[in-house]
Image (cartoon, rainbow, N blue to C red):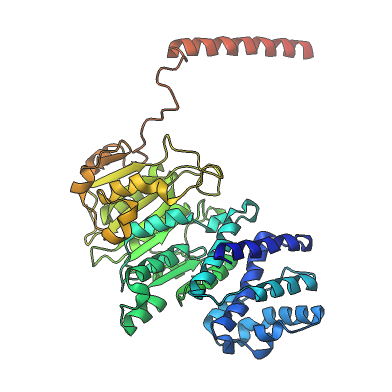
Amino acid sequence: MSAEQIAKKLWDLCNVLRDDGVTYHQYLNELTYILFLRLSEIKKFDTDIPERYRWSNLKVIKDNKELFDTYRDLLANLGTLSTNESITEIYTNASTTLRKPVNLRTLISNIDQIDWFEDEEQDKIASIYEELLERNAGEKKSGAGQYFTPRPLINVMVDLMAPKVGERWNDPAAGTFGFMIAASEYVKNKHDDYFELNQKERDFQVNDAFSGCELVQDAHRLALMNAKLHGLESRIVMGDTMTELGKSFKNYDGVLANPPFGTKQGGERPSRDDFTIPTSNKQLNFLQHIYRSLNSKTGTARAAVVLPDNVLFEDGDGRKIRKDLMDKCDLHTILRLPTGIFYAAGVKTNVLFFTRGKKETGNTKRVWFYDMRTNSPAYGKRTPFTRVAFEDFVKAYTGGIGLDHLKDDFDGVIDDGKRSAIEDERWQQFSRESIVAKNDTLDIGLIEDKSVSKNSDLGEPIDIAREAASELDAIKKELDKIIELLG
């Protein structure tokens, strides 16, 4: 069976459990606990698990109640009994949402029957888990979409950032760690699965190259499992980047992120004292954190960040933060993303690409905009959002390199000369001076919406106003009659 077929089989098991009151999101957590036990046997690290909790013991327990009691005991204690840090974190505060022992038996039996022992088994297991994460994100009722960025977008952002061996990358709002895993896979593919590297370099890539922070415990648990399945021993902290904890995340060579939308709970400002412009707007605070967390000594530290439209036009603190960003960094590209690609309906988003300068002012000379939003397809089930959608944007960004050659031929360097040669109505350049003249708004770069006809039959403005006044007058007369009758 392919990884996709196995993932579907595992996902379909949730339907069996629906009468047990288990939601898809709860089911994925449950699968994480059980899959990790199975993985520990396959990968030969089950010695880190007490013998009575090992897969080899669980699967042979005949009595359903005894199996269920052992499993609940495992979830309650494994987080404190194991000396392995990953196991401790994955099983911290773990509990089961299953109520019927027979359903646990169904899960364990089905997982045990899967043939995991094929070539490249690690890639297979990792692919299965990623497929499950994606299915969970697509289940709108689970609310998990907030932790999941569409894979085509993640991969294109990573390819354009072009991570390199020896660099330190971070995601301060890690979700299920998708950005960092994609960055790790990019570097692995560039270097023959790390076989080209010496032992010190390999150890760095596995342990130190990629890190993250996640506030929500369930998402944090899924991130740890996802990293483990992809062969990473990354530091993924459970906590809030907007607290004092976030001050320790610094001097990175790169950041890839899709920070949460909205305002801080209760409208509070971040509880850390190192922001020049503290605000209650989460995205603006994350943006500040990200460009401040980049290494300012190399001139090559870079970031690609998904942010909603309000970051581009919000006045007051928003304008100050945009100005600070354009001073400290070269904000060279803004991609206006199409609507409908995220699970939150109606949210309009963008990707900001920028490089940290060595100096503190004057780093942005011009900003290039690409409009993928206007006159674009309505992406959804009928029109899936795939990597192909980025073909023209990638050519504009790279100055002529297409998707097929992106990983091999693009090293992340921005060439304004090549960019200027690209002829595409969606590709526009604005000088820093012209942006200053627009009051530092970045809500620009959208082309004409052809769905709205310039020669519509709405009429002249004065005629529209007269007609509206006439209708209001008629409504007032009707209301006067009603008042008179009631009086």
Numbered disc total: 0
Measured from the top left, where is residue 146 in percent x and y? 55, 55
Question: Which of 389 and 415 lies nearest the eye of the viewer?
Answer: 389
Direction from residue 471 to residue 357 in the image, left or right? left
- State the image quarter where residue 181 is shown: bottom left
Q: Quadrant of the C terminus?
A: top right
Residue drawn at x 26%, y 40% as measured from the top left = 430
Direction from residue 356 to residue 25 in the image, left or right? right
Question: Looking at the image, is 161 positioned above or below residue 96?
Answer: above
Direction from residue 351 to residue 405 in the image, left or right? left
Residue closest to the far left = 417
Q: Quadrant of the N terminus?
A: bottom right
Question: Looking at the image, is 357 positioned above or below residue 221?
Answer: above
Measured from the top left, where is residue 328 in percent x and y? 27, 56
- State the image quarter where residue 484 is shown: top right
Q: Could you tell me if residue 103 is visible in this image?
A: yes
Question: Looking at the image, is 26 positioned above or below residue 80?
Answer: above
Measured from the top left, where is residue 138 in percent x and y? 58, 53
Measured from the top left, where is residue 374 in percent x and y? 41, 36
Question: Looking at the image, is 476 positioned above or below residue 384?
Answer: above
Q: Could you tell me if residue 316 is visible in this image?
A: no
Residue drawn at x 59%, y 12% as measured from the top left = 471
Residue drawn at x 50%, y 39% as measured from the top left = 378
- State the image quarter where residue 111 is shown: bottom right
